[in-house]
Image: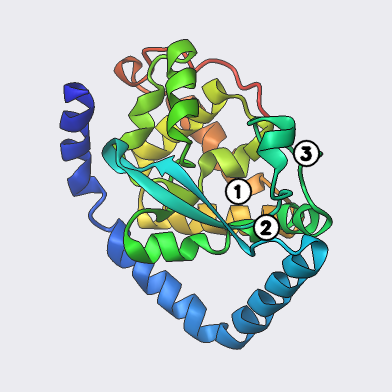
Amino acid sequence: MARRRGRARRMSGREAYKRPFDLLLLVFVLVLLSPLWLVLGLAIALAIRLDDGGPVLFRQARLGRAGRVFEILKFRTMAVDAEERFGPRWAAWNDRRATRAGRVLRRFHLDEAPQVVNVLRGEMSLVGPRPERPGRAERISRSVPGFPERLVVRPGIAGLAQARGGHDLDPRDKLRYDRLYIEAMSPGLDLRLCAACLARALRASPSRAGRGWAARADRRSVPSDHDPAGVGGSQTGG
């Protein structure tokens, strides 16, 4: 824990660009496309309510920077009693827990849109490792040493792991790509990853930008002290 806090302090200088970057890009996009966001948001809310009459938003505790717990926001994509009926599990593209509206939202990643509120609050960044549930992160850490290293930066809506495969990656591959991102993060890389994840959501050349950058990072290799779990081996995710 002390080691993680120390690394978080060292990272804070490199991370200084992120807050102004996030706010400037969000304000630009929200102002430029405000009529579209308003219509889209109302349409999504109506579709969710008409589907099963449940709440529009889904809230859940997640781990943020330095292990701080925050409440993540999403458009609800699962049946209200999904976890009671099926139990907690990894999200998947063919998830039986998803509602009809939820399957469409997940396909285009629109369920993540409310997380702009988490970004505005300073709990998340536009780009970074995806936040995990506290209990799940603890379980993963037992079998994937080094997994808590992802907590040295704010979690993100988009990220290198999402551009590389998202739900198709196992925790070791997610950690590998999150480490690569943390070592190389910059405004330019953040813009490229935002574009890559947007393309993936629109089903247009889904992961090409993320794959090209990751391949170059692999050739450069990550120093061994940043890969104690040996996750930097050959790629298995799609």
Which residue does the image show at 45% across and 79% down from the upper left? Answer: 28
Query: Is the Cβ of the residue at disc 3 closer than 8 Å to that at disc 1?
Result: no
Q: Which residue is mark 3?
A: 95
Residue topped by disc 2: 199
> Left or right: where does residue 7 sit relative to residue 108?
left
> At 16% across and 24% down in the image, what residue appears?
2
Q: Earlier in the sequence, mark 3 or mark 1?
A: 3
Left or right of residue 45: residue 174: left
Say which amino acid is labelled 2: Ala
- Residue 201's spot in the image, x, y percent? 69, 56
Write the residue at 22% across / 23% down. 1
Quarter of the image for the C terminus: give it.
Answer: top right
- SS at mark 3 in the image: loop
Q: CB under 8 Å between callouts 2 and 1?
A: yes
Which one is in front, 122 or 234? 122
| Residue 151 screen position, x and y as percent | 34, 35
- Amino acid type at circle 3 is Asp
Q: Residues within 10 Å of mark 2 (few under 14, many from 20)?
A: some
Residue 176 image label: none
